[in-house]
Image (cartoon, coloured by chain):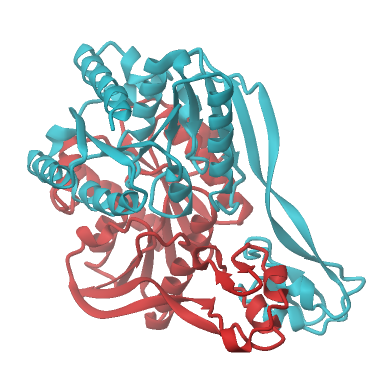
Chain colours: A cyan, B red
Amino acid sequence: MKEIVVISGKGGTGKTSLSASFAFLSGSEAIIADCDVDAADMHLLMSPDFAHNEDFYSGQMASIDNEVCTSCGLCLEKCRFDAIETDGERYQVKELDCEGCGYCERICPVGAISMKEQKAGQFYISGTRMKNTLVHARLRAGAENSGKLVAKVKKEAKRLAEQENKKYVIADGSPGIGCPVISSLSGADYVVIVTEPTVSGLHDLKRVYELVKKFDIKTSCIINKHDLNPEITNRIMDFIDSESVVHLCNIPYSNTFTDAITRGITVLENGDTEMIKVIKNAWETIKKSINDK
Amino acid sequence: MKIAIASGKGGTGKTTLATNLASYLSEEKQIILADLDVEEPNSGLFIRAEKIFQEDRYKMIPGWVENDCTYCGICQEVCNFNAIINLGTHILVYPELCHSCYACSELCPTAALPMQKQKMGVLKHYKKGNIDFVESRLDIGQEQAVPRIAQTLDYINSISDNKEIILLDSPPGTSCPVIEATKDADKVILVTEPTPFGLHDLGLAVETMQKMNKDFTVVLNRFGVGNADVEDYCKKNNIRIIAMIPDSRQVAELYSRGELVYDKVDSFKQSLDSIKHYILGK
């Protein structure tokens, strides 16, 4: 079983549309994981049935029992996150600021503070219209995206893939270079970076690639909207060439992506034959290069 | 006044809006523009200005002093993030897991874990005409965006005389970095696009903003593609759409080259004008 992760650095480059296309092409050969738990969109193209649904708990939050509290103010003094406030008498925890470190609970002289498990989101396993299984999640609004929910999504997808003898796990990663992406990349066998020929696209590609290099994973690149700026497309080609990144394909700027999203289908099902050919070829290249060492 | 420009979905045009708006408003007002997308900061590619200040940014982590340590294990016990392990003959600190709460350091009975600085990123301050532009970037491999965002906001407060318009180009999503970037904002502008992805992620962003009791509005970018569901959603939920920016390949091309758009595309400038009226309360 091989794990393929699709990432982008910059948002809005077509990462999810392409991940869903690979999910469509692999059909029952793969388990699909949506690791972009912060703004998970892949399910909008796959008609999942949300067959399995569980609460996801992660981290803790402090809570002060005002019946016991003597208003000594030690918690407020020690908290490094300014997460405790007072009106002079009563003390309370600012939920959005509490990091859950538990320091206040330990030092409260009268034991007025307790730590409570935090519900951080929902976790789902779904059957989809593509005859595969989608492991996905929804982070609670404003929750900490520590990478733990991403790790759970990936772990469950891998477990299912091994149990059901699937060939691939295809993961839609998250944008950026912080904890969720690091969590998406760890343990992967193959990375597809989706970029676009804009100054931002190139800048973010270089940053995310620097991160990918730390993992020593075989890496490939798709340039979406390549004809938007041929000069930057050439610079991206030079960059990936110099880093020995596999160039999978160039995709033209068109409204096919937006139209497909609007219809809730993948770009492969939208009737653009040239687009279908390019993406199918890319998937064949991925399958081939993931298996040679 | 602080205005945060945010979105649930990435790539909807936050940076395009923030940089063009900063430049347009600077024709009349003093502006501070801050790029708070510390993982992938891009605003600086569009605001080419002169650097006037640069400083490394740090986080505090415990540093182990072997000679003072008795291996009592209290540090490991009090760390809620598994960032410190007592091996009996050695204390291991995992800086990337550390949240800098100081519990281990301050509760160590022999003061064997003094806090020390570790570099996390760089803050840069640029100036161009009426625009002060502040950018903070996270070093590659560092995981925690939130403390960088908090430090950048502290820096902005230190240079502000409270008369400027402060524009905060926020990171995408709805989790902790967005909360940090928007929590002190007076108004939040959510940028979205008229597609099911845009609608879905707008819904999440709205939920976050409502939870924070924020005054927020929507800018609909790439208007003309997709469908009318975002407009219907906003109408139904009494959310004001302050501008609809038409979808345009010309805008995409200008953006691709790192150029500002409003001085070349009239419809874009008109949208900025609506947003200006909203910000200035006219």
Quarter of the image with the C terminus of chain B in it = bottom left
Q: Is residue B234 above or below residue A177?
A: above
Q: Nearer the viewer, residue B120 or B33?
A: B120
Measuring from the top left, give residue B44's x and y in whole percent.
Answer: 24, 62
Residue furthest out toward the right: A67
Q: Nearer the viewer, residue B69 or B47?
A: B69
Measuring from the top left, give residue A226's x and y in whole percent.
Answer: 16, 34
Q: Is residue A82 above or below residue A289?
A: below
Quarter of the image with the N terminus of chain B in it = bottom left
Q: Nearer the viewer, residue A236 or A275?
A: A236
For the point 61% across and 68% down, the residue is B84
In which quadrant of the rendered view does residue B256 lie?
Answer: top left
For the point 48% across and 59% down, the residue is B187
- In the image, taking residue A291 as reference, residue A223 lies left or right, namely left
Count of numbered tags: 0
For the point 55% across and 63% down, the residue is B97
Q: Is residue A124 above or below residue B40?
A: above
Q: Is residue B185 visible?
A: no
For the point 12% across and 33% down, the residue is A227
Measuring from the top left, give residue B59's x and y in whole percent.
Answer: 47, 75
Q: Is residue B70 visible?
A: yes
Measuring from the top left, give residue B81's x and y in whole percent.
Answer: 63, 62
- In the image, taking residue A146 as reference, residue B73 lies left or right, namely right
